[in-house]
Amino acid sequence: MLNVMDTIAPIKVKVISGRKKSPWRNSTLVKNEKRECRKAERRWRKTNLQVHYDIYKEKLHNYNLQLRNARRSYFSDIITKNSHNARVLFSTVDRLTNPPVSVAAELHSTMACNDFAKFFTDKIQKIRQAVSTSTADPGYVLCPPKNCLNTIKQFHPINSKDLEDILGQLNSSSCCLNVLPTSFFKKVSKTLESDLLQIVNFSLMSGVFPESLKTAVIKPILKKDNLDKTQMKNYRPISNLPFLSKIIEKAVSQQLNYFLKQNNCYDAFQSGFRQNHSTETVLTKVFNDICLNTDSGKMSVLVLLDLSAAFDTVDHNILLKRLENWTGLSGTVLNWFKTYLENRKYFVSIGNFTSEQTSITCGVPQGSILGPPLFNIYMLPLAQIIKNNKINYHSYADDTQIYITMSPGDQGPVQALGKCIEEINDWLCHNFLQLNKNKTEVIVFGAKEKRLQVTRELQSIHLKTTNQARNLGVVMDADLNFEKHIKTITKSAYYHLKNISRIKDLMSQQDLEKLVHAFIFSRLDYCNSIFTGLPKKSVRQLQLIQNSAARVLTKTKKVDHISPALRSLYWLPVRQRIDFKVLMLVYKALNGLGPKYISDLLTQYEPSRSLRSSGSGLLSVPRVRTRHGEAAFSFYAPYIWNKLPESLRSAETLSLFKSRLKTHLFSAAFE
């Protein structure tokens, strides 16, 4: 009978995507206005009288007005709650301006989820298999630093205040693994406080991470909107973990970071995921060194090393040995990390479909609190290799850059660079990490007439050079004029500004300004401390972006002067924003709020004899010869710092200095 029925009326499975009801329509006021509007419409259609039609039009107007207000209030609430969460803000604006980009419809199935899981796992296994671990041991010995002789055997329990601080620091993003939505979980955290403390402290004191919190859910996200949705290689795996897992991890992370900082276990030139360190401090230091080399007539060779899926190929056994031997973890603490890493699993989720669970045998947990610091610890020996070769370097997580200073015809630095790269590659192989030579880029900085000769010399160690490359989000070029980067900023900023202008009628000016800061100023201000040597033409290009944003917010016409609009918004012009960032770095460096490698670039001014300027916070300004030297942080920062009033330089707190500095620069710009 079933065979007959399948022949006559076969079962067909179709995915029906029902239209979701807009959440702002659920408010009581909107529902009441809609009810009154429908009631008036029915009366008019029944009587067909003009008076009833006029009443219906009035009710319809009131309903649409209430609907617009509810929609504005809904998105305003999202923007207010996530003013510092760029991902949420981007998705919110994207929802309002663009059709949703999702996984291809043919990939919405359990089979597709399993295929994704296999694809992601196979990718990691191929990398580990491709890395040669059968080579002879390297001819160098790496010893743990002597400053990490202290050990930590036991975590200390946390209290109610610690738990409150931890919950306040974690964002409210949620996933399907949570028993309760994260936002609701935070609201009832006081009620659950004793239970939460018991769970967290039991894990800390017993040295065991809960098995139930080791499963991650992975959602494939298309890398770029214009890529083929049917190709799995075009998707990036985004991992989510249970919120309770992050609470425990945060408690451990705080104690681990305190121990590492107190015992000076950090690599001085590793800036990834460290307090008071950033991509900007890294680029400021590297840019400063290159500018000074160019100013002195020498050449700089910068090598940007690229690693393939570095976080995912970390070997657990090697990591545990590094935790023990290089950072001094032992006892219950070391056992906690052992249980944290082992027996982890994940599954892929697409829509309502999920894959089978897959075991994770390597890598630090993606989307976790502890993943980044664990990776930094894993990479500690790499710094020693580079130092042994007397090569300058900087790292930000898995992005490592090494650079040398040389003169054309001097083979010594080139050979040292080649030897260093070989040793780096050997160490990476022995640690199950893969150097992606095709994506590793080399730039030569210095006089144009000398670059060709240096490029030829680099060919002897099989390094191909390029005129520009992206370095931690900034496109650096051999001429140090950032032309390509300025074009990238301009294109991206105008795209987002166009989207913001399309929804300006749905937002209040206050919310629009938050979006402008999130999408426009985040691009104008990103690493702008290295824009000190920008020509006026480039500064003008960036200023036009800011002017356009001000016109959108204040509804200023193109023919009207822009200064009143900028003044009314209390915005610093682009040139002053650059100086503001540089001076903030100086204040932080002088007050122990920045990396040592930045404070080392600044020297207190010491007059040859006792003067009134002694002790006034002045800095020594080094001598330079060219515009490149003037763009270096070690010259430009003291030069503009010394121009500040003494009362401003001696501000007692960072917030006070920041406030006074903006007022000072604003007055100077619009006086």
Image (cartoon, rainbow, N blue to C red):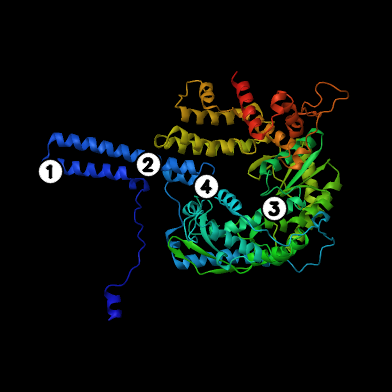
Residue 427 % position (x, y): 76, 60
Horizontal side of 613 relative to 106 (left or right) equals right
Residue hosting label 4: 87
The earlier-in-sequence mark between 4 and 1 is: 1
Please determine whether, in this image, residue 373 is positioned above or below residue 129: above
Q: Splitting the image into 4 quarters, where does residue 488 fall? A: top right
Secondary structure beneath disc 2? helix
Q: Which residue is mark 3?
A: 257
Query: At 54% from the left edge and 31% from the top edge, which residue is drawn?
Result: 545
Q: Is residue 500 visible?
A: yes
Residue 437 x, y percent position in the rendering: 70, 55
Identify the image quadrant of the C terminus.
top right
Q: Amino acid at mark 3?
A: Asn
Q: CA distance from mark 4 to mark 1?
A: 50 Å
Q: From the image, state whether disc 1 or disc 3 is nearer to you.
A: 3
> Residue 449 location, x and y as percent?
77, 36
| Earlier residue among tags 2 and 4 | 2
Residue 71: which numbered mark, if any?
A: 2
Looking at the image, do the residues carrying marks 1 and 3 touch, with CB atoms under 8 Å apart?
Answer: no
464 or 628, which is in the foreground?
628
Q: Amino acid at mark 1?
A: Lys
Q: Which residue is mark 1?
A: 46
Amino acid bearing label 2:
Arg
Q: In terms of secondary structure, where does tag 1 sit?
A: helix
Of the residues under marks 1 and 2, which one precedes in the sequence? 1
The residues tagged by marks 2 and 4 sit, at their Cα atoms, a distance apart of 20 Å
Neighbour tally class for label 3: few under 14, some 14-19, many 20 plus, Cα within 10 Å: some
